[in-house]
Amino acid sequence: MNMLTKIKNWIKYLVRPRYWLIKLDIDYHDADQQILYCTMEILKKFYNLQTSELGHVDWDFDEEHRKVFAEIKEIVIWWRNYNIYKKHLYTCPIGIEEPDMFYLFTEQYEAEYKIKYLSYFDWLDTEAKIDAELDAEAQVMLKRIINIRPYLWD
């Protein structure tokens, strides 16, 4: 690394904010969702920084760095797709009538509602299965981030 590059990196290091606040832009969040969201947002910000002019890690240094950077990119792309899919999950499609949830919890109407709103409950079961699959994928992605954590310094 030549002297000019060292000076440039030193200046970037001094002027760039090093600590970020993560703002949760989801309406309701349990601790498990906070962990997922914050971890993924930190990785996304790290990736965006490394792909900008401010990034200073040489990801082409060796094969190991190239693999880690490919892993980071893959997780970030997954996170973008995950957010798009989660945003539309449980949004009732056109043509399926939603029942009044108040009556759902009364025994008198339960059997009648299950018959009348069969397509709604089928759709809801499908969405719940997809949601469970997404949660399983998220668990795998968090573990992948743990494996690459030593490379996430800037």
Image (cartoon, helix red, strand yellow):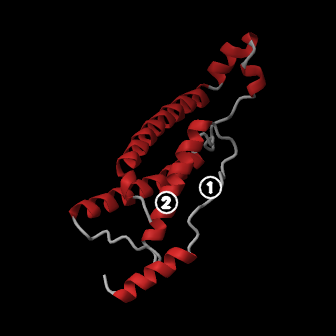
Which structural element holds mark 2?
helix
| Residue 88 picture location, percent across and down | 58, 47
The residue indicated by pointer 2 is 44
Q: Name the secondary structure under disc 1.
A: loop
Q: Residue at x 38, y 60 (%)?
A: 73
Residue at 75% x, 28% y: name it.
100
Q: Amino acid at mark 2?
A: Lys
Viewer-nearest residue: 41 or 14? 14
For residue 115, which quarter of the picture?
A: top right
Cα separation, mark 2 vs mark 1, equals: 11 Å
Query: Quick check: 27 left or right of 136?
Result: right
The residue shown at (21%, 63%) is 63
Residue underneath mark 1: 22
The residue type indicated by label 1 comes to Ile
In this picture, residue 152 sits left or right of residue 29: left
Q: Which disc, if any, is residue 95?
A: none
